[in-house]
Amino acid sequence: MISMAITSPLPMGPHRRPVFLAGLVGLACALAVGKALPLTMDGISNVLAPLCINSAAASPLDKVEVITSHALPNVPGKRVTIVRVFYGPGGFSHAHRHAGTVTAYVTKGEIRSQLGGGPVETFGVGQSFFEPPGSTHLVSANASNTEPAELIAVFVADEGAQLTTLIE
């Protein structure tokens, strides 16, 4: 979805262990995930690594925080991953597509979004938008050049799928 540092907001209590993952081309991506997930550290890295997109961020303030990621026990082979996306003033991500479905909910500022074949739309706090599997997300950007923006994105995709792929 975005090419930025990824960190985890999960509390670092005795039942959590941070895991860091680096990726290059612009910015290093870092993941920290609690050991409460029923996976090995390698398994966690393999599942969440696709959230690190290998391209430069528009703003040093742009980042993605992994909130949680869980296999769906009632839907074998599927996983839900929830992330918080921060865009600094003028921040954006490059054109991309996702392996599964994505539902986004704006929690701060305004987000400009355009799916292939559709108009550019602006979504404010409390609004949401949906991306069907394989949609081309041509525009994903902070609508402001002076204020930050934030959204929560919920991915539902096949286990092990690369969640985000840049479009060249």
Image (tube, helix red, strand yellow):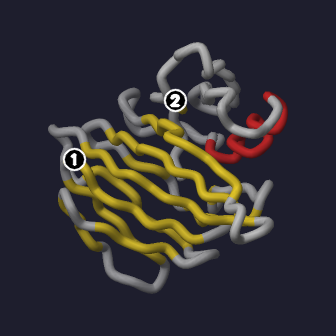
Report how far apart the C-alphas of labels 2 and 1 lie in the structure.
Answer: 19 Å
Query: Judging from the image, what secondary structure is the residue with disc 1 in?
Result: strand
Front residue of 127 and 1: 127
Vertical order, 50 against 112 (above or below): above
Q: Residue at x 58, y 30 (%)?
A: 26
Q: Position of residue 65 (x, y in %)?
A: 48, 36
- In the rendered image, the quadrant that contains the C terminus is bottom right
Quarter of the image where one finds residue 15: top right
Q: Crowding near pointer 1: few (<14 within 10 Å), some, many (20+)? A: some
In the picture of the structure, the residue carrying the numbered disc 1 is 108
Front residue of 129 and 95: 129
Report if residue 106 is visible in the image. Answer: yes
Q: Position of residue 128 (x, y in %)?
A: 31, 68
Q: Position of residue 135 (x, y in %)?
A: 56, 76
Q: Residue at x 34, y 51 (%)?
A: 151
Front residue of 43 and 27: 43
Q: Position of residue 137 (x, y in %)?
A: 50, 68
Q: Of marks 2 and 1, which one's residue comes earlier in the chain?
A: 2
In the picture of the structure, the residue carrying the numbered disc 2 is 8
The answer to whether residue 32 is left or right of residue 43 is left
